[in-house]
Amino acid sequence: MKLSLGQKIGISYTLVTLIALLTLSGVGAVFLTLWGNNGCREWQGGAKYLQAQFANQSPPLTSKHEAEAWLNNFVQRGTAKSKIGEFIEINIYFSKEDLAKAALISPSQKILAFYPSSAQGLAGRVLWKKAFAEYKPPPLSRQASIVAQRQNACIVEIPIKERSQLRGWLVFVYKVPAAKQRLFLWGSVFLLLITLTAPLVLFVGTVSGWLISRSMIQRFGNIGKAVKEWSKGNLKTTIDDGGQDEIGLLAQRLNTMANRLNTLLKTQQELAVLEERQRLARDLHDAVKQQIFAATMQLAAAQKQIQQNPKKARLLLEDATSLMHQSQVELTNIIQQLRPLNLKNAGFASVLQEYLNTWERRTGIQVKRTIKISEPLSPSIAEALLRIIQEGLSNVARHSNANALTFTLKQEAQKVMLTMADNGQGFEPNSVALGNGLRNMAERTEELGGRFQLHSTPGKGTLIEVEIPLEEGE
């Protein structure tokens, strides 16, 4: 399926948004997992704070019943209670499921109260080290709290002092979830979040892409319209884009290019006018001027002979009349070549047909024509082809003495082919210097990257072949 630029941009924005959400979710899950594995570090400050609070309001350690009640409340509520209605809040909250074991230890390292309650019967006779042997706790400190990690648990030991006198310890094991377990937990949370927010993300990404692509498509559309006008020869069209980004810079460069091409085209047109003037001067000098001069000489000679030899004078007048007629034909040919051809309002094929009909009536030379042109040709190629055809037909009318001409013009996918074959007197190309007309035809063809060939044999006519390549889409 072929997608438009706007659709591609909209889809890309949606995909980028989803990928960003997935990436952030993955990073967040890993971060929270790592953060969760640092649970022991969280207890460093909490243990010190709790030790400081115990100095003012210590747990009841004199009575077994009160000690068990205090410890159970500590585990159940995540707080420390010194007496009824008064609690010591700690800055780390936990639930009873987070504690594997907890105990209040006497100064002689006897267990006064133990959690879970199923082990309460052991409290009076089991040493603390044996009860916590599976976690290998560090030695009890009489001065400062200790937080140590063993396996996937934190051992927290808080000495309980009152007036600098050691009254015992609060010791508990805080479970730290495994990395895989926490990663699975947070990954599941983020996956659920993505599932719930994906429709909104898709909508926002699609709308954002459409809004952004709309402006870009409009700007590229302006460039496309200008390029289309340039292809028609209207180089005065400019791209209206004041942006300072890459598209705006491209528009400025294209406008500069079109301006330079327009200047170059004007220069070429001026050179073409000068070239036509020079060719017209050569034609008038080589043909019309010489014929008028010869007719003038014939008239002068006839004037001298009109009294003495009327018959000879009549022959001289007939020659002068013939020369004047030839001059008239030459002038007509030159005028026809100078007539501007309306290629803008009429198609190339119709203009060419009209020109051939006029030329056939004027010269009396029958034209057998085949014209197969797919419109439109570029202005430069159409103009060059018409000038080449005019030059070739002018040579046929002047020099060939032909009465028939075969004219073929065909357009294929990548080239235009022109052939003009007359049945005139022909000539030997290698022994005769090419005239200006043939040289002009060859030069125009080569300027367009084409190929020009001339074939002629005395008494068998002349064949001209022109082949001009076309660019893709032209």
Image (cartoon, helix red, strand yellow):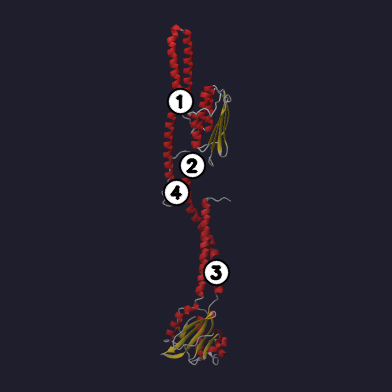
**Residue at the top extreme, as displayed:** 308
Q: Nearer the viewer, mark 1 or mark 2?
A: 1
Q: Nearer the viewer, mark 2 or mark 4?
A: 4
Disc 2: which residue:
228
Cα separation, mark 1 vs mark 4, equals: 48 Å
Using the numbered discs, state the Cα–Cα distance from disc 2 to disc 4 in whole angstroms: 16 Å
User: From this viewpoint, is residue 117 visible?
Assistant: yes
Q: Which mark is residue 250?
A: 4
Query: Alpha-carbon distance for marks 1 and 3?
Result: 92 Å
Percent from the top left, x then y, of residue 114?
A: 53, 87
**Position of residue 102 measured from the top left corner of the image (x, y, whole percent):** 52, 85
Residue 92 appears in the rendering: no
Secondary structure type for disc 4: helix
Q: Which mark is residue 283?
A: 1
Q: Earlier in the sequence, mark 2 or mark 3?
A: 3
- Amino acid identity at mark 3: Gly
Label 2 to label 3: alpha-carbon separation = 55 Å
Whichever of callouts 2 and 4 sits on the residue coming sooner in the sequence is 2
Q: Secondary structure at mark 1?
A: helix
Horizontal arrangement in the rendering, residue 276 relative to residue 152 (left or right): left
Q: Amino acid at mark 2?
A: Lys
Please determine whether, in this image, residue 179 is positioned above or below residue 354: below
Q: Is residue 306 above or below residue 59?
A: above
Using a 10 Å C-alpha cutoff, classify the residue at mark 4 as few (fewer than 14 neighbours), some (14 to 19) or many (20 or more): some
Question: What residue sits 44% from the left and 51% below the top?
Answer: 246
Q: What amino acid is found at the position of numbered circle 1 in the picture? A: Asp
Mark 4: amino acid? Leu
Query: CA separation, marks 3 and 4?
Result: 47 Å
